[in-house]
Amino acid sequence: MNQQKTLLQQRTVAQVMESRATSDGDGVKIRRVAGFNHKAFSPFLMIDELKSDEKADYVGGFPPHPHRGIETLTYMMQGHFQHKDHMGNVGELRSGGAQWMAAGRGVIHSEMPMMDDGQLHGFQIWINQPARDKMKPAKYQDYQPETITELESENSGLLRVISGKLLANEQALEGPLMATGVATSVADWRAQIGDSVTISLPREFNQLIYVYRGEVEVQGKRVSQGQVALMSQGEETKLTAQKETGLLILSGQPINEPVVHYGPFVMNSIEEIEQAIQDYNAGLFSTY
C-alpha cells in the first residue's frame, strides 16, 4: 500500500490569480476572482468573497435580480443573509451554513443581510451548468451549519466539507450539498501553523484553492491571502499551513463547452444570451 501511495501524482500550483476589490448588488464590497473563459477554472466561473465589519459595506445587500444558466453556492462563515425568490422560497443563511441554487432557465431572487452591525464574512461561488441543464426549472435548497460534514484532527486542522465527495488523509467525506450538473466538491480548511492535510480527487477534476486567511504551501509554492491557486492535474494535493490559515478547496469535473457571459446570464452562445435578455424583459422569468 505504501508503494502504491508513492506512485500517486502530486498536484502542483500551475497559476496564481489575485482577487480584486469591487462591488456588486446595492454597493456591497467584495473581492472577486473571475475565470469565465479559463479552462482550468471550469466548472467554476467566479468566486466572490464578502468580508467587512462596516455596516455600510454590506447593508444594501443584493436586491431582486435574475440569473440563467448557472448554479450558485453561498457559504456564510460569519453573519446572516436571507434568500427570497420568485418561486416562493425563503431561507435564512446562518453563520457556518450554505445555500445552493440552480438558476436553470430563469430565477429572480434577492439576498439581503439580516444584521445591522457586526462582522460579515462569506462567499458566493458561481458554478457553470452544462448546456443540457441551462433551460431546466430552477431549484433552491439551504443547509444549516449543523448539517455540514466536519473532520477535525490534531496536526490536520478542521475540514468542513460543504458539497460533494473527497478523500482527506485517506478518509472518505461527503458534504450535504450535491450540485445537479457535474460533480463538484467545495470544502473549507482551517489550520494552525504547521498543520497539513492531503486531499485526493479524481485526476480529471480541476482544482482551485482560495486562501482567505494566512498562507499555505503546496509542493514548495506558497499561496497567500487573497490569492487563488489553479492546480495542475494529479491525484493528491498536500497542503501545509505556514500561518494560521483558512482556505477554500474547490474541485470539479470540467465542462468542455463554450462560455458566453453577460451580467447574471451564462450561456453557450450570444444568441442564447440575447434570448435570456428578451425573456427577462418580457417578464417570463417570474412565470417559470
Image (cartoon, grey):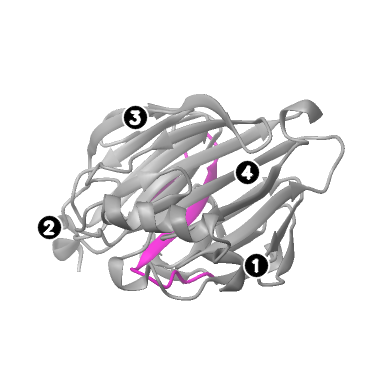
Quarter placement of the C terminus? bottom right
Labels 2 and 1: the sequence-earlier one: 2
Residue at x 56% of width, y 32% of height: 244
Mark 2, mark 1: which one is toward the viewer?
A: 1
**Mark 2 neighbour class, 10 Å CA radius: few under 14, some 14 to 19, many 20 or more:** few
Quarter placement of the N terminus? bottom left
Residue 70 rendering spot, x and y as whole percentages = 43, 59
- CA separation, marks 1 and 4? 15 Å
The numbered mark at residue 7 is 2
Q: As drawn, is 136 to the left or to the right of 28?
A: left
- CA separation, marks 3 and 1? 30 Å
Name the kind of residue labelled 4 in the image: Gly
Q: Quadrant of residue 219?
A: top left
Residue 264 included in the magenta stretch of the image: no
**Mark 4 neighbour class, 10 Å CA radius: few under 14, some 14 to 19, many 20 or more:** many
- CA separation, marks 2 and 4? 37 Å
The numbered mark at residue 142 is 1
Name the kind of residue labelled 3 in the image: Met
Labels 1 and 4: the sequence-earlier one: 4
Q: Which residues are magenta?
A: 177-198
Residue 256 rendering spot, x and y as whole percentages = 19, 58
* SS state under label 3: strand
Residue pointed to by mark 3: 17
Residue at x 78% of width, y 27% of height: 56
Labels 4 and 3: the sequence-earlier one: 3
Labels 3 and 2: the sequence-earlier one: 2
- CA separation, marks 2 and 1? 40 Å
Residue pointed to by mark 4: 122
